[in-house]
Amino acid sequence: MVDDFDYRFSSEVFDDQTGLVYYNHRYYSPELGMWLSKDPIGERGGYNLYGMVGNNAVDKF
């Protein structure tokens, strides 16, 4: 049943063919648990270019 939906845990579309989630500017791999490309804003978002909200989304929102 879950395969019938493009939206799963994330608010973005999951691609069944690649297994990736596209977040408007870069791809996220749920299997690897990481982004596959650098943060498009560069070091302005922090020195970890592959991170998001300091890897602590609960405290950031």
Image: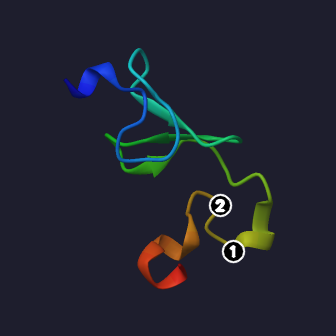
Image quadrant in which the N terminus is located: top left
Mark 2 Cα-neighbour bin, 10 Å: few <14, some 14–19, many ≥20: some
Q: Residues within 10 Å of mark 1 (few under 14, many from 20)?
A: some
> Which amino acid does the dot numbered 1 rest on?
Gly
The residue depicted at 55 percent of the width and 63 percent of the height is 51
Q: Is residue 53 left or right of residue 44?
A: left
Whether residue 54 is situated above or below residue 14 in the rendered picture: below
Side (left or right) of 42 relative to 61: right
Q: Horizontal and vertical percent for residue 53?
A: 56, 72
Picture layout, residue 35 above or below residue 43: above
Alpha carbons under labels 2 and 1: distance apart: 7 Å
Q: Contact (CB < 8 A) between labels 2 and 1?
A: yes
Placement of 27 over or under 34, stated as above or below: above
Residue 16 versus residue 41 in the image, above or below = above
Q: Amino acid at mark 2?
A: Leu
* Residue identified by numbered label 1: 46
Which residue is pictured at 64% across the width and 41% down the height? 26
The residue under the point 58% across, 57% down is 50
**Which quarter of the picture shows residue 7?**
top left
x and y percent of residue 13 in the render? 50, 33
